[in-house]
Amino acid sequence: MVAGKHRGVTCGPIIYTLVAPSYSFPVIPSISSMHSTPAAISSSLRRFATVAPAASRSHKIVVVGGGTAGLTISHQLLRTGKFAKDDIAVVDPADWHHYQPGWTLVGGGLKDKENLRRPLAGMLDSKLRFYNTALHSFHPEQNSVTLGSGDTVNYEHLVVAPGIKLNFASIRGLSEALADPSSQVSTIYSYDTCDKAINTIQSFRKGTAIFTQPAGAIKCAGAPQKVMWLALDRWKRAAFYNPTSPSESPINIAFATGLPVMFGVPKYSAVLEKLRQERGVEGLFQHDLISIDGDKATFARPDGKEKVTRRFDLLHAVPKMGPHDFVKNSALADQAGYVDVDAHTLQHKKYPNVWSAGDASSLATSKTAAAITAQSPVLVGNLVKSMDGKELNSSYDGYTSCPLTVGESKVLLAEFKYGGEPKETFNQWFGVDQATPRRAFYHLKKDFFPWVYYEHMMKGKWGGPKGWIN
Ligand code: UQ1
């Protein structure tokens, strides 16, 4: 998952002009209109050059993305002790770094969103060079990238971890409904709207609530139902919902998902399907939300059936997601638009000095922060080996995890690897079946993970199931 949003590739005035391949000189376009004589211009340029000396535009490593993957990898690279100041550069246009796994808890009324973000610039070690700008394009044949500012930055190795983008336009009427404070439509998938989710849930007394999940890859595939389970508990507590006689309850609940099942891993899907039935939640499978019109939601049917329109009083919607255009349209992308890396080494299949992890990568596993805990040490280990001209010796097994809040103090801790095969940390250590929802897992999710994330993982010191590293 990545911090904030990428502002795309259209940028303001170009403020740097290259005068030598690895040396750039700042020029403000409007400068000539401010000063009339050449002497004044040259004195201004000198003054500007003194306050902002031209930095080197070549780095041993350029990391694209200051989200979970980008920051974890950058700091783990630094902690190898092999890199000096400015050897590693990070490119990201965002002002804020968000702890996105916390947004489900915001939607459930269990956390405040303000506490889940930090200024991105303040999270980077001072040894890292920060380009706080969008990325324009990749030039892997030239070992360089072009920034939104127009600058070219050269690298020996490139790490591509810009995350994915939310395609709000994938659901007609969604953006308008989200922006309308009087509509009962929300999503926990953005900072701006995750608190609208709890506001609509909290004030809901009666009617039909629909929670949706799109077909296709999204960040944290369990989140669309996590917020539903938290809402259900809240309505149950307030006596607006009775799971044992849903038809007589003031509120009725439906889960409309583009997928044919509750979850992609059979072991956990079976438990979640049982919960759905026990709790009287209607299951609308292979229902992929495509438009919202007032209180009507229309669903395409991936199974080829006729479109379905349902009336709702409250809607929690999840937009489709996909690669950023600057990744999709680059030489680094696979057919689907993701960075085409080896599933185990995380090295690019065509360009051996290009690496990728996280949501933007082609790694066929669930897109989560937990996955980054396992991907980062593999990428860093292999990249450093490659720099030293040695054989790659780290392999990623697809590890990922989804702590599923199935109630206000209950979490089912799904942990699995490639092929949907469970790989449960606490089962290995203590023999506990993690498909059973537990309060201890809830506290891991709500209290421990946010803390360990900012205090240790973001500094390159946390290895997820492996505990503390480096
Ligand atoms: C984890 O390390 C982590 O990051 C801090 C998460 O983030 C939100 C997780 O969800 C999970 C499951 C882990 C993995 C750690 C352990 C101890 C299982």
Image (cartoon, rainbow, N blue to C red):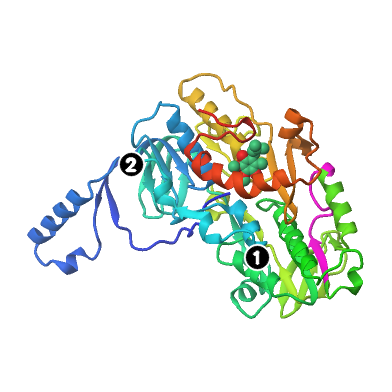
State the image coordinates of residue 419 (x, y, percent, origin top left).
77, 37
Circles 2, 1 touching at the beta carbon (< 8 Å): no
Q: Quadrant of ligand 1?
A: top right
Q: Nearer the viewer, residue 91 or 425?
A: 425
Q: Mark 1: which secondary structure?
A: loop
Q: Which residue is at 90% across, 58% downward?
A: 277
Mark 1 residue crowding within 10 angstroms, few (<14) / some (14–19) / many (20+): many
Q: Which residue is at 69% across, 52% downward?
A: 217
Q: Earlier in the sequence, mark 2 or mark 1?
A: 2
Horizontal arrangement in the rendering, residue 302 relative to residue 377 (left or right): right
Horizontal arrangement in the rendering, residue 247 relative to residue 287 (left or right): right
Residue 288 seen in the figure: yes
Splitting the image into 4 quarters, where does residue 292 fall? bottom right
For label 1, the residue is: 187
Horizontal arrangement in the rendering, residue 146 relative to residue 270 (left or right): left
| Magenta region | 252-267
- Amino acid type at circle 2 is Arg
- Residue 258 among those drawn in magenta: yes
- Amino acid type at circle 1 is Thr
Q: Nearer the viewer, residue 393 or 200?
A: 200
Indicate which disc residue 57 carries: 2
